[in-house]
Amino acid sequence: MKILSLNASDAGGGAEQIAWDLFKGFEAQGEDSWLLVGDKKTNDARVVWFHDNTNIDYGAYGKSLAVLKRTVVKSLCRRLGVEDFQFPLSYQTLQASGQVPDILHCHNLHGGYFDLRALAPLSRNIPVFLTLHDAWLSSGHCAYSMGCPKWQTGCGACPDLTIPPAMERDATAWNWRNKAKILKQCRLYVSSPSEWLLSRMRDSILTPAIVEARVIPHGIDLERFRPASKREARVGLDVPRDGFLIVTAASSFQGNPFKDLNGALAVAQLLGETQGGAAMHLAVVGSSGATQRAGNLTIHHLPRMPHEKLATYFQAADLYLHVARAEAFGLVIAEAMACGTPVVAFDADGIPEVVRDGETGILVPRGDHAALAAAMRTLLHDTKTRVAMSEAAACHARLKFCRTRMVQDHLNWYREHAGAG
């Protein structure tokens, strides 16, 4: 079976990781697996690029008049706040890997590389599967509405145009109607990592496009993310070996309104001011800046790191802190749990489907930083409960978030519909 996956890039954040893991997982299972991207960052021979591809005919698109027209339209879209779908190579997606695939599996379709209007003709030719990584397809511009309900009624008068993908002017009502028109013409097999996200999308303009939908939780590398001795894991890390270690991580905290670096620092301040006794350290992975102090808590800003080193930080940690303001699933949460690290996070979006409150961690109301600090104080003082949660977290992750299971679930689904068109 030939499978062509489609994503904005082959390396980056959580969506890129899942797209890559599925692409490589299909290949490991003996399938003819390819990944088509708008921005190629790896050297993998089976990752093909829209903009340097011997299988794509660039002739019509490279003519000076066509280029000028696209340039003008793109400029107008930016100035008017209209989502830019001026990517004509999208219509050659099925030819990009040399021959028409049996399955097209789409991931993030925003990111400045794909014409959403191409989705309808593509889905009339072969089965098109779509993994939801956020709620962009339901809105007039944003990946997450951050509590705004207007995605249900047509957007317009957007309360925050800076939410990614950001817009210069408010054309969200037009964008919403345009997406609705496009999606009505599509036939999609929709996969969601959480019931929360799928439920939202079933109540959105995506609904007419859904032929079939399933919840398939994201899988992680359980050989890499696994429990280990905390004492041994701390050797060689960029934090002291003594005291409690708390970790929070993101592909990038700076400039990401969904991950909320300021919220993490606010929680650290509250914890450091009230927690007595042993020294504490908070490792903020995916951030930059000088070391900070908050009472008896030291905050270490660390750059994004390879998974091998990130797993070591999780193994060394006493707790994992997650302060994301919007989260469809929480891949990094699952990775921390797999290392036997209890999680303290907000009871919001898809997070309760990953963390079992009171069993593998503690969940508190969204936005309540004081409650997060209090939950961490409780677990740091209660070694017995923390150890029990550690064991439960690792066990739960092994059962629920296996990468091999994720790959096989998709392959089984593909086989039900390959050749259906």
Image (cartoon, rainbow, N blue to C red):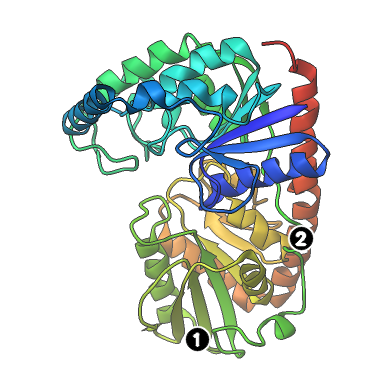
For residue 137, the mark is none
Of 329 and 77, nearer the camera is: 77
What quarter of the picture does the C terminus occupy? top right
> Which residue is rendered at x = 67% and y = 50% of the image?
356
- How far is mark 1 from mark 2, CA to CA? 29 Å
Residue 312 horizontal/vertical position (percent) = 67, 73
Residue 78 horizontal/vertical position (percent) = 21, 33
The residue that mark 2 highlights is 394
Above or below, 166 against 205 in this view is: below
What is the quadrant of residue 214 in the picture?
A: top right
Of 115 and 341, nearer the camera is: 115
Residue kind at label 1, given as amino acid type? Gly
Residue 160 horizontal/vertical position (percent) = 25, 39
What is the quadrant of residue 316 in the picture?
A: bottom right
Of 157 and 296, nearer the camera is: 157
> Which residue is rendered at x = 45% and y = 83% of the image?
298
First in sequence: mark 1 or mark 2? 1
